[in-house]
Amino acid sequence: MTTEQQSTYRIAVYPGSFDPVTMGHMDIITRASKQFDLLIVAVLNNLSKNPLFTVEERKDLLSRVTSHLPNVQIDSFRDLLANYVRTKNANVIVRGIRSVTDFEYELQLASTNHKLNPDAETIFMMTNPKYSYLSSSLVKEIAHFNGDTTDLVSPEVDLALREKFKGNAGR
Ligand code: ADP
């Protein structure tokens, strides 16, 4: 690839916990994949959180539900996001916004990342109103209590949730 091609080749990173990936995440991934040459969906390997799915499980689910999107790659990282983005030669960080509460946190995150890596621009995509209430935590809570998650996640994720909670009453 020539230097000129490199500078016009737009690589974006969409970081998150994705524990598990929801239809809200999928909506952002699908829309973002149309805006960039390569979209790297990066699972944050955050030791301080207590996830339901392992990083490998989350990556596997993400790979399966995005297999129809050729310019989407799945990865994980445990570095500072600003450093990870640099190692991937990415110039954009994609984040989704659902509410004013998201905005306040995301603004802080974007400002921090800008300070640490001024070359990377954070771009926000507004939630599809259909999914504005949807979060991984909500999906896990519903699945835990044997509720119906079929409209909230892809069939692969729905199955994985059933497997995780099959010891629970009613599953
Ligand atoms: P994090 O732990 O970093 O918040 P998440 O996996 O919860 O990771 O979310 C990753 C990104 O996706 C965040 O920018 C979050 O705001 C966004 N997001 C999550 N759910 C939705 C949704 N329903 N609609 C739009 N954006 C969303």
Image (cartoon, grey):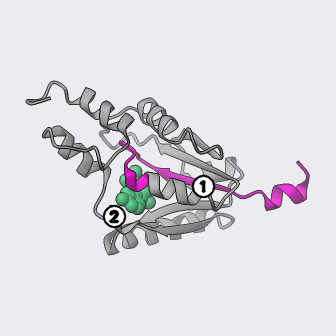
Disc 1 marks which amino acid?
Ser
* Picture quadrant of ligand 1: bottom left
List the residue tagged with mark 2: 130
Q: Given this view, does label 2 or label 1 mark the residue nearer the observer? A: 2
Task: Look at the picture and state if 101 lies above or below 34.
Answer: below
Q: Residue at x 60, y 47 (%)?
A: 40
Which stretch is magenta? Answer: 1-25
Q: In which image quadrant can residue 155 be found?
A: top left
Where residue 82 appears, as percent x and y from the top left, is: 59, 56
**Left or right relative to 151: residue 146:** left
Q: Residue at x 48, y 58 (%)?
A: 28
List the residue tagged with mark 1: 33
Q: Look at the numbered disc 1 and say if its residue's Cβ is closer than 8 Å to ligand 1.
A: no
Disc 2 marks which amino acid?
Lys
Q: Look at the numbered disc 2 and say if its residue's Cβ is closer than 8 Å to ligand 1.
A: no
- Disc 1 residue crowd, few under 14, some 14–19, many 20+, Cα 10 Å: some
Of residue 57 and residue 119, the one placed in the foreground of this image is 57
Where residue 147 appears, as percent x and y from the top left, is: 16, 43
* Label located before the other in sequence (2 or 1): 1
Query: Is residue 24 covered in magenta?
Result: yes
Of residue 159 and residue 25, the one placed in the foreground of this image is 159
Task: Look at the picture and state if 82 lies above or below 108.
Answer: above
Q: Residue at x 42, y 36 (%)?
A: 58
**Left or right relative to 169: residue 33:** right
**Left or right relative to 104: residue 137:** left
Looking at this rendering, what residue extends furthest in the right direction? 2
Which mark identifies residue 151? Answer: none
